[in-house]
Amino acid sequence: MVNVDTVYQKVLALANKEQRGHITPQKFNLFANQAQMEVFEQYFYDINVARKSQGNDTVYADVDDMLEEKLQIFEGVDDFTTISSYYPNVPNYMYRVHEIEADRGKKAEILNTKDFNACRNGGPLLSPSMTRPIANVRNGVITLVANQNINLMVNITPKFIYYFRLPAKVNWTYVVINKQAMYNANLSTQNFELHSSEENQLVNKILRLTGISNQQPDIMRAGAVMDQTATQQQPKI
């Protein structure tokens, strides 16, 4: 987890050079959440690339393991009784469904729409079965199939759904003293939920957004360059 006040103070220190790039708490919270989502969403692209490349036996140096560590805080699992009132719709708190387990210990293969339709209409060799159910998640709706053109609910009841949730919304809370916003940690304060190693990247992204908002090209470029430098310094996938 990354402390929200630490990031805010760093952004202020960098953006306030020569008093040209002040950022209000309201703008900071807006930019902080955008930056957090950029980093969070990038995990899924990076892990997809990492799994296509060969890993190594050193856990702390394996990119796939590093990304899994960063994502595990957002992973959740619900049993069917918890989500039965939603099914087949995906509850709002589920950002990405990545595994569906049926009641007989069978895991449904989650396919994109094209492959899902191909399997359903591809004849005996491709068609789903009781031992090889398939699933598709599209537009917030889960479709589970165990036999050709037969909904899985007729044959196998979903038991567990594994998913990734969204990071909690960042909130830097404050009180105004002598017309200055001063940090005030309380129950409404929300730190970044990202891995602590992402602190510098968050600062750089927020700084870039601040430069764009304040129409300060130098601040924008500084944030973009630092963000790019930090990315290049990360282990190559």
Image (tube, rainbow, N blue to C red):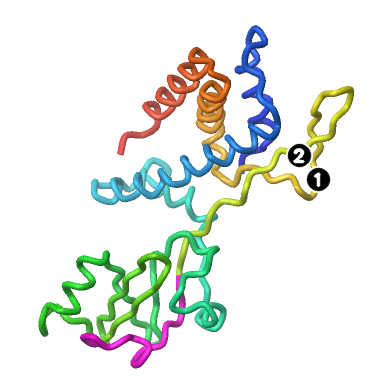
Q: Nearer the viewer, residue 150 or 107?
A: 150
Which residue, given by chain and number where applicable, does mark 1 sit on?
Answer: 186
Residue sitting at x 39%, y 69%: 99
Quadrant housing the N terminus: top right
Q: Position of residue 129 (x, y in %)?
A: 23, 86
Which amino acid does the dot numbered 1 rest on?
Answer: Asn
Location of residue 58 (image quadrant): top left
**What is the span of residues highlighted in magenta in the rendered image?**
147-161
Which residue, given by chain and number where applicable, does mark 2 sit on?
Answer: 173
Inspect the magenta stretch and tell me whether residue 138 lies in it.
no
Location of residue 98 (image quadrant): bottom left
Chain-order first, disc 2 or disc 1: 2
Q: Position of residue 124 (x, y in %)?
A: 11, 85
Q: Nearer the viewer, mark 2 or mark 1?
A: 2
Left or right: 236 with respect to 5? left
Residue sitting at x 20%, y 73%: 117
Residue farthest along the right direction in this orientation: 178
Secondary structure of the residue carrying tag 2 is loop
In the image, is residue 156 above or below residue 122? Answer: below
